[in-house]
Image: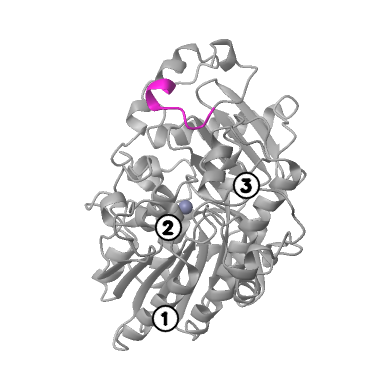
């Protein structure tokens, strides 16, 4: 990329710049962003300031309400679905993708309509869920390299300390403890990646991707193995929507049966698109999306069996995603960074479903429109369990939104790419995305422009300044900026 290519007039910049490249580029940044300490933000240990001093002024500590947990405390099932865009589910308004099990489950509890992740990458996002911390504070940024410190509390470790039985079942190898450090607190920790063939590559997505039928079988088996004498915390991770997109049987042609081209969802195709050697036509792109949607429908055809085992009034069930997926929506991105993940902080990658059911506190068919974020589940689930919320928590309990004691209008979500090139704030109807290497920004009104195609930075100057100051404050708080 030329030096002029990173001037203030340009926004596009590969999100996957190496750290060294980013530091080199900073010398020509034009907006005076104070990023001198960004080296602290990558792989940093723990934010120095306690969570209670968060920029949001709304973290767990200050939003603990008077909720009294049930006795005995409820069991908790946390289901994470990899690479699941919020807008692909019927319950989030998709007109034809078949997700009847997820739709029915969501209708039995509360649906969060603007739920955002902290980093659109598997390990970092899961580390945020389990630790309640932003990736810059948890230290889990780079996929399969950074690991959560065992000195930090996790949902599993806190609940195990309260007498919960704990089990984590995951369907991709990157969530093995050696690659993420998330085993802490789990008494059972099982990798459900497809079996490794003799001489095979253990990290080969094409052969080792876990499948929802097997994931569901294992989860149901684990449920039957739990003792009835104490509550359980079960984490189940599904991997099906993650590329390669090769859904089984009829799911492969469910959404584009007439396609005659060569586009398939194999890893070779994914790689070719990412390295720029394959430029999908509109028909090809429709087929690629159809295959992704087939994976989602296959997952849905299996997950209903798990939901059937999770009924009852004394069990909390939360279903969410770790990030979304890009399908060429944003031409401003680097031409090879407009597909898959992790490439951007647009809603296509940052927004995921959150469906929560716990009959004592959730009303069937209800919805929450406030901005919520992945780290909010940590204090929420611990509060429902009657467990103490560790001081490391940087999210805000969702319970005040459910009982109406809080409107949620002041809430915001903060996200960053693994290398901090892009950071963003989302608050009410607005999202500001900052390119920290070029110093450029983009501003979108999410209600009027959910596809984020119309940059309003030039006309909504007060809104941009307000959000920009808030974003800068958060970046300082988590040591991305000084
Ligand atoms: Zn993922």
Q: Is label 3 or label 2 in front?
A: 2
Label 3 to label 1: alpha-carbon separation: 31 Å
Query: In the rendered image, which quarter is residue 218 located in?
Result: bottom left
Left or right: 47, with 401 as reference point: left
Q: Is label 3 or label 1 in front?
A: 1
Task: Evaluate whether residue 38 shows in this view.
Answer: yes
Report the disc number at residue 207: 2
- Of the two numbered discs 3 and 2 on the same chain, state the one appearing first in sequence: 2
Query: In the rendered image, which quarter is residue 74 located in?
Result: bottom left
Label 1 to label 2: alpha-carbon separation: 24 Å
Residue pictured at 34% horizontal, 67% vertical: 168
Left or right: 438, with 384 as reference point: right
Q: Which structural element holds mark 3?
A: helix
In the picture as drawn, the residue positioned furthest to the bottom comes out as 228
- The span picked out in magenta is 14-22
Residue pictured at 50% horizontal, 46% vertical: 120
Task: Evaluate whether residue 482 shows in this view.
Answer: no
Q: Is label 1 or label 2 in front?
A: 2
Q: Nearer the viewer, residue 50 or 99?
A: 99
Residue occupied by mark 3: 348
Residue pictured at 55% horizontal, 21% vertical: 439
Q: Is residue 165 magenta?
A: no
- Could you tell me if the residues under marks 1 and 2 are in contact, i.e. CB atoms within 8 Å? no
- Of the two numbered discs 1 and 2 on the same chain, state the one appearing first in sequence: 2
Percent position of residue 448, x then y: 77, 44
Above/below status of 243 relative to 478 = below
Label 3 to label 2: alpha-carbon separation: 27 Å
Residue occupied by mark 1: 220
């Amino acid at each position: 990329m030329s030096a002029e290519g990173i001037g203030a007039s340009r926004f596009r910049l590969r999100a996957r710049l190496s750290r060294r490249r980013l530091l080199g580029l900073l010398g020509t940044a034009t907006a005076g962003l104070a990023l001198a300490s960004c080296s602290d933000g990558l792989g940093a240990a723990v934010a120095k300031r306690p969570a209670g001093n968060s920029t949001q002024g709304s973290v767990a500590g200050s939003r603990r309400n008077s909720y009294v947990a049930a006795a005995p405390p409820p069991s908790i099932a946390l289901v994470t679905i990899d690479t699941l865009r919020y807008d692909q589910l019927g319950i989030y308004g998709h007109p034809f993708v078949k997700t009847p099990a997820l739709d029915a489950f969501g209708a039995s509890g509360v649906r969060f309509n603007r739920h955002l992740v902290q980093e659109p990458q598997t390990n970092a996002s899961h580390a945020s869920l389990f630790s309640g911390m932003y990736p810059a504070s948890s230290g889990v940024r780079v996929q399969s390299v950074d690991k959560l410190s065992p000195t930090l509390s996790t949902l599993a470790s806190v609940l195990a300390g309260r007498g919960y039985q704990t089990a984590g079942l995951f369907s991709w190898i990157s969530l093995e403890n050696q690659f993420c450090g998330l085993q802490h607190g789990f008494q059972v920790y099982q990798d459900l990646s497809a079996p490794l063939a003799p001489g095979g590559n253990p990290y080969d997505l094409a052969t080792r991707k876990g499948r929802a039928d097997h994931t569901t079988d294992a989860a149901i088996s684990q449920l039957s193995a739990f003792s009835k004498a104490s509550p359980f915390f079960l984490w189940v991770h599904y991997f099906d929507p993650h590329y390669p997109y090769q859904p089984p049987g009829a799911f492969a042609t469910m959404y584009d049966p007439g396609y005659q081209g060569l586009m398939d969802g194999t890893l070779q195709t994914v790689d070719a698109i990412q390295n720029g050697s394959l430029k999908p036509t509109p028909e090809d792109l429709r087929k690629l999306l159809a295959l992704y949607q087939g994976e989602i429908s296959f997952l849905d055809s299996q997950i209903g069996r798990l939901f059937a085992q999770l009924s009852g009034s004394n069990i909390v069930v939360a279903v969410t995603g770790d990030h979304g997926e890009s399908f060429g929506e944003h031409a401003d991105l680097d031409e090879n960074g407009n597909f898959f993940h992790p490439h951007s902080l647009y809603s296509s990658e940052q927004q995921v479903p959150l469906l929560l059911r716990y009959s004592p506190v959730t009303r069937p068919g209800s919805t929450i429109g406030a901005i919520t974020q992945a780290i909010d589940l940590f204090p929420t689930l611990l509060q429902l369990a009657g467990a103490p919320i560790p001081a490391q928590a940087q999210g805000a309990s969702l319970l005040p939104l459910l009982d109406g004691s809080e409107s949620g209008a002041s809430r915001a979500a903060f996200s960053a790419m693994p290398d901090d090139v892009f950071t963003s704030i989302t608050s009410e109807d607005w999202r500001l995305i900052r390119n920290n290497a070029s110093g450029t920004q983009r501003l979108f009104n999410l209600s009027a422009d959910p596809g984020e195609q119309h940059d309003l930075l030039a006309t909504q100057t007060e809104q941009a300044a307000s959000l920009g100051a808030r974003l800068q404050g958060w970046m300082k708080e988590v040591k991305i900026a000084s």
